[in-house]
Image (cartoon, helix red, strand yellow):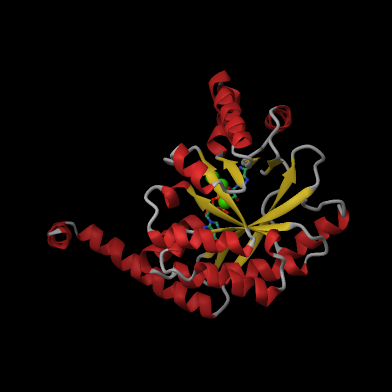
Amino acid sequence: AKSRYANAFEIYRPEMRRAKDAEAELVGEMKRGLDRNEFVLQFQPIIAARGGGIRSFEALVRWNHPRRGQLAPAEFIPAAENSGLIFHLGNRVLLDACAAAASWTAPVGVAVNLSPIQFQDGQLAMRVREALEASGLAPHRLDLEVTESLLLDPTPTVIRMIAELRALGVKITMDDFGTGFSSLGNLRRFRFDRLKIDRSFTEELASGEETAEIVRTIVRLAATLRMETVLEGVENERQEVFAKLEGLDEVQGFFYAKPMNGDAVNRLLAERAEGTRP
Ligand code: C2E
Ligand code: CA
Ligand code: CA
Ligand code: CA
């Protein structure tokens, strides 16, 4: 019944068909782009809130599109997810991020964003193991960032993948925390290594005590569950002072650095050789 209505809808909404055609074209270009290595990673440092050392870098994918220039993930990840191409693209990101981190001159970590779709085919843990083996990267240096939607209604495959990933010894971070629908039960049950508090909270800190109190509550919750905390989207000194004062473990944002290419990572590490992760 669902597809029948979708069809009827399409007949009366030609602009929907155009949007679908545009997405199909994008997916075709993405396939070619993957073969031509048009997808590249940038890296943004994640910093110890106290001490200021570099703990890790988050890998952020970009598409150097031959006609449209460099595209941000928001412009192609949704189409990759809808088409299933996210498995191929996500695996490429994993391989490239691990290889990059293994080549860095300091043993800092690398954080890789995963789409919840990547947990669905039951092969993710094997792919991660292969990326670790191919690069020689120590598992504790790889941090997988997942979103709350992964745990909204976890299937047996998702639960098995999480267990297999934990068994590999990689870290898992709950990304964009506070924007989705995490149940406290799931948070406790899966007990990931880190909570990354969403940028929207950081932005709103200046607008009143209520947001600050919510962030304090999240930090206490994380401490109870023995999870580390990261504040993302730190853009100014006031937000940094807050993070230090409230005992956040790590901070990330334009105040410290924008995402940079691999060469810039090595230059930065050479300048600040102190950064390692415990
Ligand atoms: P995210 O995981 O929340 O990544 C942080 C995003 O915020 C990045 O945008 C980063 O450039 C931006 N950002 C960092 N610091 C600041 C700041 O201080 N202020 C502001 N305004 N923005 C900041 P980007 O690179 O466009 O990535 C957007 C989203 O795309 C990411 O959000 C992530 O969900 C997704 N993404 C990126 N790379 C990948 C990937 O390899 N695979 C998958 N599945 N998703 C990815
Ligand atoms: Ca992320
Ligand atoms: Ca995030
Ligand atoms: Ca975010």
Residue 69 lies in what quarter of the image?
bottom right
Q: Residue at x 87, y 55 (%)?
A: 273
231 versus 90 height, above or below: above
Taking 85 as reference, is 66 left or right? right
Q: Is residue 76 visible?
A: no
Rendering quarter of residue 270: bottom right
- The answer to which of 272 and 63 lies nearer the viewer is 272
| Residue depicted at 57% across the width and 19% down the height | 209
Residue 236 locus on image (x, y percent): 69, 34
In the picture, measured across the screen, residue 139 lies left or right of residue 107, that is left
Q: Residue at x 46, y 72 (%)?
A: 30
Classify 184 as above or below 92.
above
254 left or right of 144 in image: right
In the rendered image, which quarter is residue 185 located in? Answer: top left
Residue 264: give x, y in percent of width and height.
76, 60
* Residue found at x 29% / y 64%: 20
Seen from the viewer's position, the closer of residues 24 and 219 is 219
Residue 11 screen position, x and y as percent: 14, 61
Task: Name the quadrant of the N terminus.
Answer: bottom left
| Residue 114 image offset from top left, x and y in percent | 52, 59
In this image, 147 relative to 170: left or right?
left
Q: How many marks?
A: 0
Regarding residue 4, the answer to whether it shows in the image is yes
